[in-house]
Image (cartoon, rainbow, N blue to C red):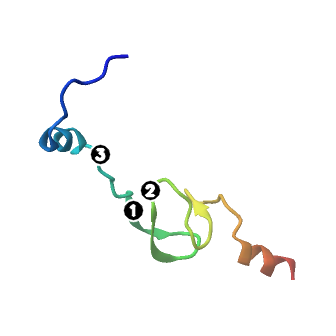
C-alpha cells in the first residue's frame, strides 16, 4: 500500500477536520396531554415524565407501575 511522501501541513489537516462537528439534539418544548404540563423532550420521543406519545401511553414509567400495584 502506498505511503505519503511528504507530511501534510497542519492547515491541510484542519481543513479536512472542519466537518467533524457534533450537532445539538433537536429538543422541542410542548404541552403533554398525559401529565398536563409543559416540558422539553427529544423530537419524536415519548414524554419523559409520564410516557405518553401521540396521545397514547407508549412507555410504562416505573413510579406509576409501583403506585398501580399497591
Mark nearest the camera among 3 and 1 is: 3
According to the picture, the residue beneath numbered tag 2 turns out to be 43
Snapshot quadrant of residue 54? bottom right
Image check: 30 left or right of 36? Answer: left
On-image quarter of the C terminus: bottom right
45 relative to 64, above or below: above
Answer yes or no: do the residues labelled 1 and 2 have beta carbons within 8 Å? yes
Q: Nearer the viewer, residue 21 or 25?
A: 21
Residue 13's disc number: none
Rendered residue at 62%/65% (across/down): 51
Q: Quick one: 41 or 54, which is closer to the camera? A: 41
Q: Which residue is mark 3?
A: 20
* Residue 21 vertical placement versus 62 (above, below): above
In the picture of the structure, the residue carrying the numbered disc 1 is 27
Residue drawn at x 18%, y 35% is 8
Q: How many marks?
A: 3
- With 49 as the anchor, is 41 left or right in this view? left
Quadrant of the rendering where the N terminus is positioned: top left
Amino acid at each position: 500500500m502506498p505511503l505519503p511522501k511528504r507530511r501534510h501541513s497542519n492547515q491541510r489537516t484542519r481543513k479536512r477536520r472542519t466537518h467533524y462537528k457534533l450537532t445539538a439534539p433537536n429538543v422541542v418544548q410542548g404541552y403533554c396531554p398525559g401529565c398536563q404540563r409543559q416540558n422539553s423532550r427529544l423530537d419524536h420521543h415519548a414524554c419523559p415524565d409520564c410516557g405518553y406519545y401521540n396521545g397514547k401511553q407508549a412507555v410504562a414509567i416505573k413510579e406509576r407501575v409501583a403506585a398501580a400495584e399497591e
